Amino acid sequence: MLNLLTDIEGLSVGHATDLSLGSGVTAIIFDEPAVASGVALGGAPGGRDTALLDPSMTVAEVDAFVLSGGSAFGLDAAGGVQAGLRAIGRGFPVGSVRVPIVPQAILMDLLNGGDKAWGLQSPYRDLGYEAFRAAAKGTFALGTVGAGTGATTATFKGGLGSASARTSTGHTISALVAVNALGSATVGAGPHFWSAPFERDAEFGGLGLPLTIGESDTAMRLKGMNTTATTIGAIVTDAVLTKAEAHRLAIMGHDGFARALLPAHLPLDGDTIFAASTGRRPCAGLPDFLELCHLATLVMARAIARGVYEATALPVDGAQPAWRDRYADGR
């Protein structure tokens, strides 16, 4: 287990990162079409081909997910991934043609100090294609990479995180998330993460929770009222699921947002979670699925903390400091 989304057999992850732009793209490419759904609970979501993820809609499987910075401009990224998939013959068959199904969610990172003066065409289609070309199995980078490149939070630089777990019957479930929250992943002004009760193997510092949590620690901390934010991610399992079950898994992933971020799902957040099944292992009924739902919450909460913990500040003037800039020694 790598404690990454690539612990799931049947998928690859690729990043495209532009530090001068202060933004990037992450692509999750499935080896075969994956049963998928998704849920947006933030008040300001942005996405492409997300309506088809509703369990009542006809198409049940996707070829890829895309997470991107760039706000609405970033929606071009799915076109780049789609182009790569089309070139290798992937896609939903419609007569004699195939249409790759690539749902995408975007986050707002236009005000982080990066150079957004890109002229007539945004760079995100090219970044999407680059992320597709970079997709690989095994280890991938976390923190200030891909969709987490320009991410921020109320207290520290945000970033890309991932975490995984195994059920008692051997199924694997993993989360990948770009943490760009309007709220905070840390308790008050200190180094501790709200996700601390769920941490494994000191994956985000092993600090636990503070001895006491007072009123000042739970006071609302926001990164500003003149911006939108958005935390976006995916939950994937190797267990065979229906589209309706994938939808429920996405809802349970949002419980992870609520345990890792304070506050979450605000009117200016576009918090969105995709969920998918690669279908490599049979699911042995309701008890198996209930455990997957439980772990979906935990892996998402852990992934959020890892995204902030692994982040580094952007190399631009006035960039938000990273957690490591202040608490490199864990204190």
Image (cartoon, helix red, strand yellow):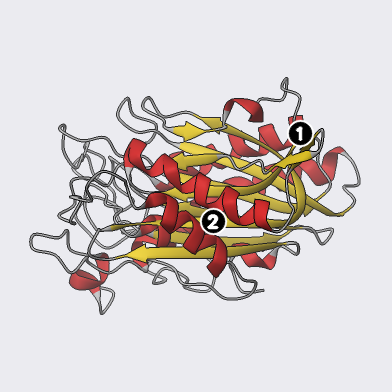
Disc tally is 2
Residue 251 coordinates in the image, percent (x, y): 59, 33
Q: In which quarter of the view is residue 126 placed?
A: bottom left
Residue 328 vertical position relative to residue 112 in the rendered view, above or below = below
Q: Identify the image quadrant of the N terminus.
A: bottom right
Q: The disc labelled 2 sits on which kind of residue?
A: Ala
Q: In which quarter of the view is residue 32 placed?
A: bottom right
Question: In the image, 260: left or right of 235?
Answer: left
Q: In which quarter of the view is residue 232 placed?
A: top left
Q: Identify the image quadrant of the C terminus.
A: bottom left
Point 58% across, 66% down: residue: 135
Residue 303 coordinates in the image, percent (x, y): 49, 57
Q: The disc labelled 1 sits on which kind of residue?
A: Ala
For the residue pair 78 and 110, the one nearer the viewer reads as 78
Residue 46 vertical position relative to residue 239 in the rendered view, above or below = above
Q: Which residue is mark 1?
A: 60
Residue 93 coordinates in the image, percent (x, y): 79, 38
Question: In the image, 253: left or right of 214?
Answer: right
User: SS of the residue at dot 1?
Assistant: loop
Point 67% across, 32% down: residue: 247
